[in-house]
Image: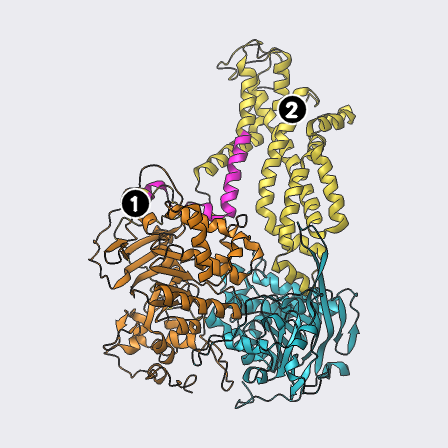
């Protein structure tokens, strides 16, 4: 047990960028276009904390998760795992896999339909060095950790015999088998029935609190992010446009995109219509200058169309990527999270 | 999207003779569904997906149908319009569509269940249209959008000339907020939101009286969803069609629907006006469902959703289907299945023994809240702790 | 594995029946044969009779015994060739599909070459290089045939593997740190079983054809009896011209029947993979009494004719939920 393991920050990403080259087929000028799926993203994943990344499809959040899991190589930027720099071109090691795990969106697609649950759990155990004799007990322990009890009942089932919620718990159990320090969850509940979603969210929260994992929760649903997270990050067109600790950005959003998101969520208690300009979807071209959100922004100014804004510190732990807040000081990338506080909440769940 | 019914030559299939005849139609309602049952498979492996569902839909009103997997909400509407795929069969009940003639006064009832192919073709798309769940992939990828409109109009209005069809297509696109140049594009050149609007425009092409929407915004992001919902609201106000809107997102329905029916395990378990259902649910499942949506405002507290898993339709328990997951379950619930009963004198319906007139214990406080008295007052927040 | 349901389709049952019959013939044929097929001490060129059910050849050999004994070599070689070819196509196809890059380019080139070269001339050329004594060895012939029969299956399996490669569960296996060869063997290959089974059936079909052709041309040793050899002798003794149908028709029918059986069983595999193709568990008689049309058309959901049956509910107490 070295000192690194006691440090609060488990995994850091600094200026991660991922480009894709596309060619539009069938055009006369078949020039290559550079698509920036993720652009200069910096994040800290802290032990015992949940960080939520909120964005629409196409915002780059899934690519970000895969870069953090190192199954996609970043075009530039660096990762720091427990204080050690990881070179971008290095191969993904088994050791990294034992520290950082990823849970995918569709539980039925992410389990092999021809293998029983037992296989899905025993493989990661065996790969990461468990003895044959211990496999059964460890698999049962993993199922118990995700509240699938009695574990014997589930070990011999096939994936199609379980419900979506149960199968997603199996996926999480599989990720936990290797005893990671960081758990990345890419939209873990969007394909589940509404009534089982909270069970999975509470499970993630429980794992974070009781086992001190660092959890990254990716979603398009800002309400569930608000429910679960200690820090919320909003992504648009590959960039982080706003981030805050706690619920600050949901209660008092400062970036027009966040405001649009929150206004668009159906809220029967507060029916105000969202102000929209025109319908256009985000473009990721490198050639585009200025703020990515300017074409859709109701408050766009001239400066927004010519240069990309820096991050401005609009509050304690609250950063906004928008020229509207140019009067505030510029934010520094490194963020240290203090002891988390939540209002009116018992200390133990 | 072309008419889903294939054009076939040859003799019509025989009218299938079924027991009761259709009661005379009530022209106030555009759709009357009685004791509707749908099974998957027959014989020993039969699974009942929709069990004796009855409801009426007033003209120009919006009915929201909420439920999760296994609730039967999609099966219900596909079977009603006879679009359900094998091995689905309709095993009972009736679904009567009261169509108005061209002059707007003459009302003819058409029982969709007993209708033959000719009658269905007459009614489909002109009087009832449907936007299906996978609408984003329902557009033919090798046809331009204009061609889709052309096919629909040609099939149902053969007397229209090409120029008139084009004009109508442009008008329809304008109705959903798209430019006319979209007619020359292919589906893959458009965004998800635009394709969904085109599906809606196609559904409205012949000015139907009833439009059915099966989870139209589930695959879209929340901002596009908001635009689509606003658009639908505006279209409904303008054209006055009735709508059945199916979704799992209850909060969406409260904004859009006049009435909401909540389905569980193939049955309607609660039916009420939208705001009443949201403020004052009466069925434990509705309560659980409402509590499954983390709120955007207010203090953060732990919510539990509903324990257990959605029901297995091939292995339903005796008594109430929801008993194993219900926090207020009583002995009676495990023995007898509660019917859909009226609550007092209102039009509210709920299928729960807690609200039976001869219930032993009083109704739990969470299920006896009062709805807001006028639309402006803010309701109490969250569940009473 | 999943519980195997006995197929109900009459096509598949017929196919299985045919194959079972011939497998039995393969196993006990030589034991059942009344005479030594090579014995020439019978009256030549007689038609079917009580002593010789299928008559005798020009050399005085009993054709029925030849047929029974010949079944073994034919079927064994065909099965062997089919298995080896399918194994080859699986290794090459999955490796090419999953590994991609230069491996894929090289292996695809290899399979394209083998596809382009006509199979029979290649067989003849390879066969002519074999030493004469090994031509009587069924295994060698089987191997040679499998060399020309793997390429098509490899292409199909490569395409399937490429589509499986992007599935989430393969990505999940990579995430937990599974090695590549284990992913191919343990995650991808089991999902290819239906395609493999189909490929095997067709390869066996091809192998029978190839073996019989080789024997018919006279490239295999005549000391080993198979159906092709019977045809060879029939042809060289002008049996068709002399209207000795009992000589060349029976082996031809046997070959055709085996092929038909294999094709019919292949239908069953399609239905096994795709449950929607199954007829919703009903016989046509049941469907008629219930009032359902013979073929259910899209857009015209059927309505049951009989009175509505109430929903069946189990009377057990609900199982404890998760």
- What SS does tag 1 mark? loop
Tell me where the magenta segment starts and ends, as one range.
Answer: C258-287
- Name the colour assigned to chain C in the rendering: yellow
Specify the principal SS of the magenta part: helix
What's the colour of chain B in the image?
orange
Tell me, yes or no, whether the highlighted magenta stretch contains residue C21. Answer: no
**Colour style of the rendered protein structure:** by chain
Drawing shade for chain A: cyan
Q: Answer yes or no: is residue B297 visible.
A: yes
Rendered location of residue B266, percent (x, y): 36, 63
Judging by the rendered image, the residue that carries numbered circle 1 is C291
Q: Chain of mark 1?
A: C
Residue at screen point 55% across, 20% down: C64
Side of B152 relative to A176 (left or right): left
Residue C280 on the magenta span: yes
The mark found on residue C213 in the picture is: 2
**Label 2: chain letter:** C
Question: Which percent across, then down, holds residue A227?
Answer: 54, 80
Q: Crowdedness of circle 2 by 10 Å Cα count: few (<14), some, many (20+)?
A: some
**Residue C280 in view, yes or no:** no
Q: CA distance from mark 2 to mark 1?
A: 52 Å
Q: Residue at x 31, y 45 (%)?
A: B118
* Depth check, front residue: B375 or B178: B178
């Amino acid at each position: 047990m070295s000192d690194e393991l006691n440090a609060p920050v488990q995994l850091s990403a600094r200026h991660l960028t991922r480009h894709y080259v596309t060619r539009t087929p069938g055009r006369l000028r078949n020039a290559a276009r550079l698509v920036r799926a993720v652009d200069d993203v910096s994040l800290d994943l802290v032990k015992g904390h949940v960080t939520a990344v909120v964005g629409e499809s196409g915002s780059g959040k899934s690519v970000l998760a895969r870069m953090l899991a190192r199954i996609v190589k970043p075009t530039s930027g660096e990762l720091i795992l427990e204080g050690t720099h990881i070179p971008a071109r290095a191969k993904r090691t088994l050791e990294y896999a034992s520290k950082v795990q990823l849970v995918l969106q569709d539980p039925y697609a992410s389990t092999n339909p021809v293998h029983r649950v037992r296989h899905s759990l025993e493989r990661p155990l065996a790969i990461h060095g468990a003895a044959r004799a211990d496999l059964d007990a460890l698999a049962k322990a993993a199922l118990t950790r995700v509240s699938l009890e009695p574990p014997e009942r589930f070990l011999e089932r096939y994936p199609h015999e379980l419900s979506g919620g149960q199968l997603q718990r199996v996926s999480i159990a599989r990720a936990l088998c290797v005893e990671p320090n960081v758990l990345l969850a890419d939209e873990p509940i969007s394909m589940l029935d509404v009534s089982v979603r909270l069970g999975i969210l509470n499970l993630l929260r429980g794992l974070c609190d009781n086992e001190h994992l660092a959890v990254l929760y990716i979603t398009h649903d800002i309400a569930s992010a608000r429910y679960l997270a200690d820090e919320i990050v909003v992504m648009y067109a590959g960039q982080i446009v706003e981030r805050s600790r706690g619920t600050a950005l949901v209660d008092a959003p400062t970036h027009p995109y966040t405001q649009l998101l929150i206004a668009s969520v159906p809220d029967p208690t507060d029916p105000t219509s969202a102000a929209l300009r025109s319908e256009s979807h985000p473009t990721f071209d490198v050639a585009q200058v200025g703020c990515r959100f300017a074409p859709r922004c109701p408050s766009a100014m001239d400066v927004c169309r010519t240069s990309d804004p820096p991050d401005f510190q609009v509050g304690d732990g609250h950063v906004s990527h928008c020229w509207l807040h140019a009067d505030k000081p510029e934010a520094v990338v490194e963020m240290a999270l203090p002891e988390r506080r939540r209002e009116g909440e018992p200390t133990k769940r | 999207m072309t008419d889903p019914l294939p054009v076939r030559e040859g003799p019509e299939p025989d009218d299938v003779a079924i027991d009761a005849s259709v009661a005379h139609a009530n022209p106030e309602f555009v759709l009357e569904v009685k004791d509707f049952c749908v099974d998957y498979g027959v014989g020993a492996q039969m699974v009942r997906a929709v069990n004796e569902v009855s409801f009426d839909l007033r003209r120009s009103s919006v009915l929201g149908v909420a439920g999760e997997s296994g609730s039967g909400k999609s099966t219900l509407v596909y079977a009603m319009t006879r679009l359900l795929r094998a091995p689905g069969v309709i095993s009972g009940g009736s679904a009567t569509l009261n169509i108005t003639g061209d002059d707007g006064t003459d009302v003819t009832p058409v029982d969709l269940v007993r209708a033959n192919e000719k009658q269905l073709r007459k009614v489909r798309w002109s009087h009832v249209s449907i936007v299906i769940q996978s609408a984003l992939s329902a557009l033919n990828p090798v046809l331009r959008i204009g061609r889709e409109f052309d096919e629909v109009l040609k099939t149902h209005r053969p007397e229209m000339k090409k120029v008139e069809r084009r004009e109508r297509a442009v008008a329809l696109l304008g109705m959903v907020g798209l430019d006319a140049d979209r007619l020359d594009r292919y589906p893959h050149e458009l965004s998800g939101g635009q394709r969904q609007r085109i599906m809606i425009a196609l559904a409205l092409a012949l000015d139907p009286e009833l439009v059915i929407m099966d989870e139209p915004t589930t695959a879209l992001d929340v901002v596009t969803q908001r635009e689509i919902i606003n658009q639908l609201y505006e279209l409904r106000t303008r054209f006055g069609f009735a709508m059945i809107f199916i979704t799992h997102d209850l909060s969406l329905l409260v904004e859009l629907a006049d009435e909401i029916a909540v389905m569980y395990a193939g049955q309607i378990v609660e039916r009420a006006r939208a705001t009443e259902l949201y403020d004052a649910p009466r069925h434990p499942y509705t309560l659980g469902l409402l509590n499954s949506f983390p709120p955007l405002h207010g203090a953060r507290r732990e919510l539990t959703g509903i324990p257990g898993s959605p029901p297995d339709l091939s292995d339903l328990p005796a008594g109430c289907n929801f008993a194993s997951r219900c926090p207020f379950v009583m002995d009676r619930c495990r023995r007898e299945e509660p019917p859909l009963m009226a609550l007092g004198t209102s039009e509210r319906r709920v299928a729960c023994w807690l609200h039976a007139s001869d219930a032993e214990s009083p109704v739990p406080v969470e299920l006896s809240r009062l709805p807001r008295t006028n639309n402006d007052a803010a309701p109490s927040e969250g569940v009473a702790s | 594995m999943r519980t195997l349901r006995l197929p109900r389709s009459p096509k598949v049952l017929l196919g299985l029946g045919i194959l079972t019959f011939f497998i039995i013939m393969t196993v006990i044929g030589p034991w059942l044969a009344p005479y030594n097929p090579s014995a020439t001490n019978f009256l030549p060129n007689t038609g079917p009779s009580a002593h010789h059910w299928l008559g005798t050849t020009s050399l005085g050999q009993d054709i029925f015994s030849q047929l029974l004994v010949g079944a073994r070599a034919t079927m064994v070689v065909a099965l062997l060739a089919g298995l080896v070819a399918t194994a080859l196509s699986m290794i090459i196809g999955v490796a090419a599909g999953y590994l991609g890059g230069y491996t894929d380019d090289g292996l695809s080139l290899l399979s394209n070459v083998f596809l382009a070269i006509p199979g029979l001339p290649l067989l003849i050329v390879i066969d002519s290089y074999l030493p004469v004594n090994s031509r009587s060895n069924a295994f060698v012939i089987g191997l040679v045939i499998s060399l020309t029969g793997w390429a098509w299956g490899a292409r199909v399996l490569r395409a399937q593997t490429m589509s499986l490669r992007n599935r989430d569960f393969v990505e999940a296996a990579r995430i937990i740190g599974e090695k590549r060869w284990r992913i191919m063997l343990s995650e991808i290959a089991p999902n290819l079983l239906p395609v493999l089974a189909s490929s095997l059936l067709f390869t066996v079909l091809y192998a029978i054809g190839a073996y019989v052709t080789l024997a018919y041309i006279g490239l295999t040793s005549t000391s080993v009896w198979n159906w092709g050899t019977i045809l060879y002798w029939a042809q060289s003794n002008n049996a068709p011209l002399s209207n000795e149908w009992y000589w060349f028709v029976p082996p031809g029918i046997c070959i055709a029947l085996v092929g038909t059986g294999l094709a019919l069983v292949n239908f069953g595999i399609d239905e096994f993979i795709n449950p929607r193709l199954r007829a919703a568990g009903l016989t046509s008689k049941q469907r008629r009494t219930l009032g359902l049309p013979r073929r259910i058309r899209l857009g015209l959901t059927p309505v049951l004719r009989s009175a509505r049956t109430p929903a069946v509910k189990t009377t057990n107490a609900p199982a404890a939920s998760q």
